[in-house]
């Protein structure tokens, strides 16, 4: 039986979401970062790229930016700062702890000089004490639960949203409409363990969303997972009856960078 285009598109989205929920459920059950390959394996066959609204070239640049910044900061500021670098759509988010305000500013200035970065959001906390291994493990667990909840929330472009957790504060990056961003935020703020949600989104119009989704689908066609992935468990991270929704804020305005040697990949509403 041949399915019509709209029916097939809905079927493909359902199958893709089911595959990711299954993978995330397995990771959540372990509560350990060592089991990340389970999730990576489930999305390796084209699922991860299928709904990412960034052009493939931008995804490549983001990975390169993150690796370069992380390696440099680890070697340069070891013992003086603990920095997590997250990059999405050439926007660089810095989270973690810096020993002094001067160190925080130095790290921000370094990030601003990265050739292909277009904006830097410096959310480092100035404190003499670095986060503990237990705290970081808990943050990783919260991130896994948040991803699971996003993947199971209808109307949320889960694969166009990047999640970072620092000291139980969840940062959400991605290319979304305002309605999508609000829906994702409301879903995340009730996940157990989340103390605060910070929005670092790039917003696009509804028309731009449709164009980006059409481009992503045609460029990165998804593949249906095989039956061996099994039936997904229910999404984890449901709030307890005693937990009030976490407060929501937007990140402080980032520093816009105008690199001289960056490729012509305009951000936000003008994404190719």
Image (spheres, rainbow, N blue to C red):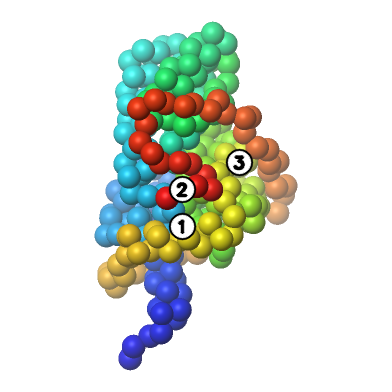
Mark 1 touches mark 2? (CB < 8 Å)? yes
Q: Nearer the viewer, mark 1 or mark 3?
A: 1
What crowding class fits label 3: few (fewer than 14 Cα within 10 Å), some (14-19), or many (20 or more)? some
Question: Is residue 152 visible in this depiction of the protein?
Answer: no
Estimate the x, y position of residue 155 in percent, counting from the top left.
57, 63
How dense is the environment of label 2, judged by Cα within 10 Å: few (below 14), some, or many (20 and up)?
Answer: some
Residue behind mark 3: 199
Q: Which residue is drawn at the image coordinates 49% and 38% (left, top)?
A: 164
Q: Is residue 130 left or right of residue 56?
A: right
State yes or no: discs 3 and 2 in contact (Cβ < 8 Å): no
Q: Toward the viewer: 250 or 206?
A: 206
Asked whether residue 59 is in view, the answer is yes
SS at circle 1:
helix
Of circles 3 and 2, the one toward us is 2
Instruction: Kindly report the distance in space between the C-alpha atoms of the residues bearing marks 1 and 2.
Output: 8 Å
Give the labeled residue for mark 2: 271
Q: Position of residue 225 (x, y in %)?
A: 30, 68
* Residue at left offset 43%, top offset 64%: 214
> Reading the chain from its start, which is encountered first: label 3 or label 2?
3
CA separation in Å, label 3 and label 2: 20 Å
Q: Residue 104 appears at what percent x and percent y?
A: 52, 15
Residue at screen point 58% across, 47% down: 203
Residue 247 vs residue 68, the one in the foreground: 68
Q: Which residue is mark 1?
A: 212
| Dot 1 or dot 2, earlier in sequence | 1
């Amino acid at each position: 039986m041949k399915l019509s285009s709209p029916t097939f598109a809905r079927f493909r989205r359902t199958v893709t979401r089911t595959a990711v929920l299954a993978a995330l459920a397995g990771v959540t059950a372990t509560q350990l970062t060592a089991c990340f390959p389970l999730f990576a394996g489930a999305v390796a066959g084209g699922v991860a790229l299928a709904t990412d609204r960034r052009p493939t070239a931008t995804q490549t640049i983001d990975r390169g930016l993150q690796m370069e910044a992380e390696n440099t900061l680890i070697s340069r500021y070891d013992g003086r700062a603990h920095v997590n670098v997250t990059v999405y759509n050439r926007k660089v988010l810095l989270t973690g702890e810096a020993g002094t305000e001067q160190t925080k500013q130095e790290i921000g200035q370094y990030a601003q000089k990265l050739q292909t970065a277009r904006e830097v959001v410096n959310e480092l906390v100035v404190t003499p004490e670095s986060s503990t291994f237990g705290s970081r493990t808990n943050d990783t667990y919260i991130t896994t639960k948040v991803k699971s909840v996003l993947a199971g929330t209808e109307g949320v472009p889960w694969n166009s949203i990047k999640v970072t957790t620092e000291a139980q504060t969840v940062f959400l990056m991605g290319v979304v409409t305002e309605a999508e961003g609000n829906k994702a935020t409301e879903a995340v703020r009730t996940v157990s363990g989340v103390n605060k949600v910070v929005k670092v989104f790039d917003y696009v119009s509804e028309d731009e969303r449709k164009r980006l989704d059409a481009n992503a689908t045609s460029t990165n066609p998804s593949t249906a997972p095989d039956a061996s992935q099994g039936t997904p468990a229910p999404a984890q991270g449901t709030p307890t009856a005693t937990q009030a929704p976490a407060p929501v804020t937007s990140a402080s305005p980032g520093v816009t960078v105008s690199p001289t040697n960056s490729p012509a990949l305009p951000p936000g509403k003008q994404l190719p």
